[in-house]
Amino acid sequence: MMKLTLALGVAVSCAIVQAASAQEVPGDAAVQNQWFTGTLEAPSPALPAAGILEVEPYAIFTQNNGVYDTKGDYHSTPNVDVFTSVTALKYGLTDRISVQALPSLSHVANSLSHYTGIGDLPIDIEYRFNDENNQTGFPSVTASLGLNLPIGEYDGLHTPLSGFGTGAYTVKEGLLFQSLFDTWGHHPMRFRVYGAAYEPIGNSSINNVSVYGTSQGFHGRVGPGFSAVVGIGGGYAFDQKWVAALDLVYNYAHGFSLDGTNAMSGLVNSHSGRSTTTALAPALEYNLSGNVGIIAGVEFSAAGHNSASYFAPQIAISAGF
C-alpha cells in the first residue's frame, strides 16, 4: 500500500502569533512577536481563540523509488509518482478546543497508467490544556481525538494503484507538546514533540483487486493493524519573516491480515508483517505576516523495514482569518 505523505497520518502544522516587529524590542518580546508557519510534518496546537479559521493547502509530489526489505536494505523499483493536494481546515470552537479536517485528492502515475481519486477523510478534535510559557520555555500540551472516515476507494479496482483509501474506520489518539523560547542573538526557536496512535475499528469486507494487494476473484475481509507515529519538529528564526524548519518522523505499522478465498476458491489467510519508516523533512518558511506564511521543503525516507522508499517535495500556504 503506497505511502501518501501526510501523514495520512499524517500530520499538518500552522500557527498564529501576533504581528509585530521582532527587531523593535529584544528578549521576551522578540519571542512574543515572532512569526511561524511550519514545520512541514508536526501537527499544531488547538487554536488560541474561538472563531479563528486556519486554512492550509498543501501540494505534495511523492516519488516512490524503492523498498526497504525486512533487514532494512534498500532495493530500487520502478518509479511510482503521486501528486497529492491536501487542505488542512481548522476552526476554533472555543479558546482551547479546535476541530480539524484534512480532505485530500491524489493523482498517481507509473510508466503504464495513471489514476485520480479522493482519499479518506480524517477529522480531529483538539483540546489545549495550557498555554506555553515563553519566558521559561515550559510547553503547551494539546490532546487530540480523531476518526478516519473511509471515503476513498480501496477495493473493486482496476489496479492497486487506482485506490486511495483504506476501507477502515480508524480512531486516532494524539498528544502534542509545543515550546517557544529565545536563543542567543534573539533568534526565537520553536519545538514540537508529538505522537499519535491509530486503531482500526473492526475488519472491512474486501472484494477483487484492492490496495491490499488482492487480485480479481478474491472475496473476504481485511483487518488493518495498529499504527503509530512519533516525531519532533523544530523551527529556528533568522528574523521575523524567515525561519528554517526540520522534522524527524518515525512511523510504525503492525501490518494487515487477509482472510478469504481467491479466484480458484482457495483459502487465503495471510499477514503483511510489521513495517517502519524513519523520515526527515527540512524546509524553509517565509512569513508575510502573523496570519499568512509559506513553507516549502522536502520529506524523504532515511531508513525503513518492509516499507517504501520515497522522496516528496512539497509546498504549503497557511492563512488565518
Image (tube, rainbow, N blue to C red):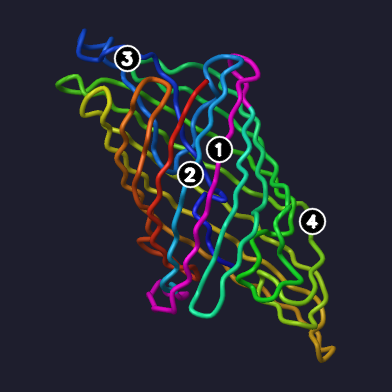
**Label 4 crowd (10 A; few <14 / some 14-19 / many >=20):** few
**Residue at image mark 1:** 88
Q: Nearer the viewer, mark 4 or mark 1?
A: 1
Instruction: Give the amino acid at mark 1.
Output: Ala
Label number found at residue 202 = 4
Q: From this viewpoint, which residue is outermost toward the left?
A: 185
User: To which quarter of the image does residue 208 belong?
Assistant: bottom right
Q: Nearer the viewer, mark 3 or mark 4?
A: 3
Extreme-bottom residue of the structure: 264
Q: Name the residue under label 2.
A: 58
Q: Earlier in the sequence, mark 2 or mark 4?
A: 2
**Alpha carbon of mark 3 to alpha carbon of mark 1: how far?**
24 Å
For the residues labelled 3 and 2, the Cα–Cα distance comes to 26 Å
At horizontal 36% and vertical 14% (from top left) the residue drawn is 19
Percent coordinates x, y for residue 68 in the rendering? 43, 72
Whether residue 291 sits left or right of residue 199 in the image: it is left
Left or right placement of residue 159 versus residue 314 in this view = right
Q: What element carries label 3?
A: loop
Q: Residue flagged by tag 4: what amino acid is it?
A: Gly
Of circles 3 and 1, which is in front? 1
Name the amino acid, label 3: Asn
Residue bearing the label numbered 3? 33
C-alpha distance separating marks 4 and 1:
27 Å
